[in-house]
């Protein structure tokens, strides 16, 4: 039996093409891999076309269920025609799967092809189009025409195949990724946190976690108009009694539980050491933070800060606990 590898000459609603691809996967796995990747790309292109159609108003004189039915058929066939030349997705899939196959075993191309076919089949449930023509058979091959774009691709069914050929790319990216920003943040501030810990009794890990929460691991720390750092990692505001330098910046305050953007004045320091010292002094001099001092338990520290009114965010303690329990801090045993 001769199987045509050209899908451009076939109807998009021809369900027999899936059976042909299954057979080709057994007879010519490498060639079938290319054609299945094209089918997958055609499915993606059809989703793009469908999204564009949905964004177009449909209240014209000639808009009806019948015109929508024929438009769907046209888009499906157009997507299949486009996929023969491709937009790059099919080539990327073949290249990635072929590279994976060489590192495993020669026959793996069959299983890879069948994996993609299974993913396509999982999206080809034979349900009628809710608002299309009653005799529309396109849903047998393209489930994109059946439901909304969100329901058309169940993540649990499609993602394993996509992950299978994208995982090596992600690994390469991770290998090229520079040193962790959180690790640099900890290494830079740990000496200052240890000094402040000696005077307050608060473990340095707790203070580093709060500084990370307030500044986004240093990425969003308060800065002057010239972009120079204010060294205020704890979001300490400049009240009427503050005699030092001040910097104004936009911050988020929670009023009646709702976040609102406001411009506030914050204290500015000449170094991180000065910032940590002022943070320690604030906790020791203010009676409302008495229960926070000498906190050996992370949960007591986080809840104590929130009860004392350190921040207006109602989820402040919970966010702080997430950082305290994160691997970024848990793996640093010397803190």
Image (cartoon, rainbow, N blue to C red):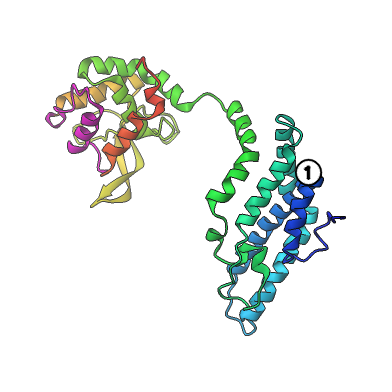
Q: Residue at x 20, y 30 (%)?
A: 300
Residue 271 visible to an observer of this rendering: no
Where residue 223 sits in the image (x, y, percent)? 40, 33
Q: Locate residue 44: give its quadrant.
A: bottom right
Q: Is residue 296 magenta?
A: yes
Q: Residue at x 21, y 19 (%)?
A: 200
| Number of numbered labels in the structure image | 1
109 vs 223, nearest the viewer: 109
Side of 70 relative to 20 (left or right):
left
| SS for dot 1 | helix
133 vs 316, nearest the viewer: 133
121 vs 97, nearest the viewer: 121
Q: Residues within 10 Å of mark 1 (few under 14, many from 20)?
A: many
Where residue 293 sits in the image (x, y, percent)? 18, 24
Q: Is residue 177 magenta?
A: no
Residue 314 vs 105, above or below: the answer is: below
Q: Which residues are magenta?
A: 287-313
Side of 315 relative to 101 (left or right):
left
The residue indicated by pointer 1 is 29
Q: Locate residue 168: give its quadrant.
A: top right
Q: Residue furthest bottom?
A: 61
Where residue 122 sits in the image (x, y, percent)? 60, 55
Q: Locate residue 48: give its quadrant.
A: bottom right
């Amino acid at each position: 039996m001769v199987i045509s590898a050209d899908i451009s000459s076939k109807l998009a609603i021809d369900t027999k093409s899936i059976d042909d691809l299954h057979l080709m996967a057994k007879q010519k796995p490498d060639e079938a891999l290319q054609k299945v990747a094209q089918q997958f790309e055609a499915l993606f292109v059809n989703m793009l076309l469908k999204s564009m159609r949905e964004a177009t108003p449909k209240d014209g004189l000639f808009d009806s269920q019948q015109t929508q039915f024929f438009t769907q058929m046209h888009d499906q066939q157009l997507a299949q025609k486009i996929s023969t030349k491709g937009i790059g997705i099919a080539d990327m899939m073949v290249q990635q799967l072929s590279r994976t196959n060489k590192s495993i075993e020669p026959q793996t191309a069959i299983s890879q092809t069948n994996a993609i076919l299974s993913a396509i089949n999982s999206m080809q449930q034979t349900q009628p189009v809710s608002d299309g023509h009653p005799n529309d058979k396109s849903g047998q091959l393209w489930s994109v025409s059946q439901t909304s774009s969100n329901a058309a691709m169940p993540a649990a069914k499609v993602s394993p195949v996509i992950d299978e050929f994208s995982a090596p790319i992600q690994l390469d990216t991770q290998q090229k990724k520079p040193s962790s920003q959180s690790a640099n943040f900890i290494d830079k501030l740990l000496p200052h946190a240890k000094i402040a810990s000696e005077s307050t009794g608060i473990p340095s890990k707790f203070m580093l976690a709060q500084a990370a929460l307030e500044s986004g691991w240093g990425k969003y720390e308060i800065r002057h108009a010239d972009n120079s750092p204010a060294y205020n990692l704890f979001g300490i505001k400049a009240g009427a009694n503050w005699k030092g330098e001040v910097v104004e910046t936009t911050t988020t305050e929670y009023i009646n539980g709702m976040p609102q953007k406001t411009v506030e004045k914050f204290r500015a320091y000449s170094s991180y050491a000065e910032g940590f010292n002022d943070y320690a002094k604030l906790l020791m001099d203010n009676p409302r933070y008495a229960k926070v001092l000498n906190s050996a338990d992370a949960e007591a520290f986080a809840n104590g800060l929130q009860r004392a009114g350190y921040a207006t965010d109602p989820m402040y303690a919970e966010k702080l606990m997430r950082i305290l329990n994160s691997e970024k801090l848990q793996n640093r045993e010397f803190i």
